[in-house]
Amino acid sequence: MKVCDILKKTGCIEEEHIEKALKIQAGSTKPIGEILLEIGAIRGEDLKEALTLQSDLDSERASDTTAFLKSIDPFSGFDATRLAEIASTMEFRQFEPGENIQKEGSRGHFFLIVKNGLAKISMEKNGEENVVGFLGEGDFGGVAALMSDGIHPSTITAVEPTLCLVQGREDFLEMIRSHPPVGAYFNELIIRFSRQIFTKLLATGTAAVAQTEPFLYTRRVKDIMSPGQLFLSPENTLEDTAAKLIGGAARIAAVVDRDGRLAGTVGFKELVEASLINGEDGLQPIRSIVTRDTTIIDGDSYFFDALHQMMKQGTEALIVMDAGKIAGILTSVDLLKFRGREVLSLIRSIEDAISLIELNSLRQDVENVLRALVADGALPSHACKIVSELNDRIVKRAIKLSEEGRGAPPVPFAWLGLGSEGRKEQTLLTDQDNAIVFDPSGRDPKEMEDYFKGLAEAVVNNLNTCGFPLCKGNIMATNPRYFGDMELWKKKTKNWITVSTERGEDLIDVYTFLDFRAVYGSEPLEEELKRHVMDQFERNPAALRLLAQPIVEIPVPLGFFKNFVVEKNGKYKNTVNIKVNGLLVLTTCVKLLAFHARVAGTNTLERIRKLVEKGIIPADRSEFIEQAFETFLGFKIHNNLLNLDEGRDFSNNVNPANLTTRQKQLLKDSFLAVSEIQKITKEVLRTM
């Protein structure tokens, strides 16, 4: 702390005296304290006490810095001397909410470590801010700029008061030069950050599996390069080059001289500029338009190496070398499309399946896809969308097989997926949650009840055979509560909303039902039923309040000082439940707010974005809530896979003691976001 700040805080000096002394100091080499004495602004004993306090605070701060560094990688293995040496080059700096810690496109001047607080990482895309992550205790910032071209690739903004340990650029570079393992650690950190922003910014966000999915994976560059590589000579003409590019699959070609040496690259961009803008003759050789500023990568490098190179060099194409020879060009499109083919192949197999045994086998392949997506660094929500899409295909095929031998359905119907299936947020071996609704089309519903009851029983049993366990709570189409024609469904849902909620009946299955989505059959039936349910909530707003009341009262497992409050005994001693206290609360609050705002979609992230558009959820908090959702899903998937590998029953309990510092902070932030959505739900629905 500066001497002036100490004097001001202790009431020994007025602000105007400090300003006067600073003006004098601007043209002098004297210490500020000496100037204050000369102008009679302070007493000598006050200055002496301030200097002593400053020394004590600096000593305490240095000790605090060393202890903090000792608690985090890559400094945890250093001895006291090295830690003290590094700590001496750092200082604490406070950032207030909304303050930019670093700005995308600006030069990097310092390295930082978050001591406490929360900051968001964002990047601009098409004029819009895209939040790609958050920084909490123990996280680093500023590394990418300091270790590459000096320019920040992203903006870091304080979300809440954030205290950071800051180190200047030259000191940081000297630190990684003097301690190579630290440099290696931060180089890996850049790659991990690149994975995160690549996934976030390039993700299509669509559930349509047929589209390219930008999931990362550890494949060799030479294995993911597009086939049909095009090699040209500098003597090829503009016309000939255009014909070859248009006639082939390549978007860009390598230009190689007669000795096999790389001359550069040429693509549609160069051709258009030469012929349409500059008006050059089509018979002119391409040697004058070749792009010579190229980046080379070895064919045995991994996907992540290619990604890092593209980001660092600001290019969308890399020249691939294999055994010293030019193998072709790797483009950003190549990085995106490989996983899509694998998923499409599985979809075709599901749609061609002719038996339940075959479907069951393919259901197990879905598990393998999930494992691959997780290993490849896919966002949890994207992985769940893919899994849900594949599961939908299995359900549809199972229904088709169940219809065989029964004749065509007598009237339109819809098979409704409920709960996580309805939200497209399934992970592994999710229990069945389903219902069936049919439209009598003016006929007596009883005439067709036998058909649909038989179909419901066949589908539920067949899905069980395919690997979807029966629901322990009996939330299935074989239960009369989840079966009926449209008029019966309208009566049921009206009763649930207007009568059952007021009586305080157990409506846990209603929460599950409110995620209903037509997986198979008539989507207009789903839409009609959803309009009816929304109308009922609009006429009976107290029902949403009553449904929200028990949810907003579920406590998050954090103590006063944000420490985890774990189970004290029993099977799950020393753990927290990420589903009951986290994911369930978050998705349910969002769901109830969605019905309040007449948002028809069922996916949690899509609901959040619509609620932001409608002004229900503040835009500056939605990013925090979305990140929490991703975190909970990620932990759930990890737990599911671990339980499966160890042959244990699925559990949603996590022991914080087994988590890294970063994981603990992510989980804490996620539970804080749950408190935030509970608060918003209380305010919007006016619960007590």
Image (cartoon, grey):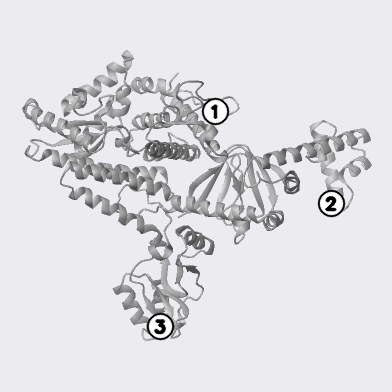
The percent position of residue 97, horizontal first and vertical second, equals 60, 39
- Mark 3 lies on residue: 233
Q: CA distance from mark 2 to mark 1?
A: 51 Å
The residue tagged 1 is 564
Residue 248 visible in this rendered orientation of the protein: yes
Is tag 3's residue or tag 2's residue first in the polypeptide sequence? Answer: 2
Tell me the crowding category of disc 2: few under 14, some 14 to 19, or many 20 or more residues within 10 angstroms, Cα based: few
Instruction: Estimate the x, y position of residue 99 in percent, counting from the top left.
Output: 61, 43
User: Could you tell me which quadrant the N terminus lies in?
Assistant: top right
Nearest the viewer among 470 and 619 is 470
Q: Position of residue 84 (x, y in %)?
A: 75, 45
2 or 1: tag closer to the N-terminus: 2
Query: Is residue 106 shown to the viewer in this render?
Result: no
Q: Secondary structure at mark 2?
A: loop
> Between disc 3 and disc 1, whose residue precedes?
3
- Location of mark 2 (residue): 26
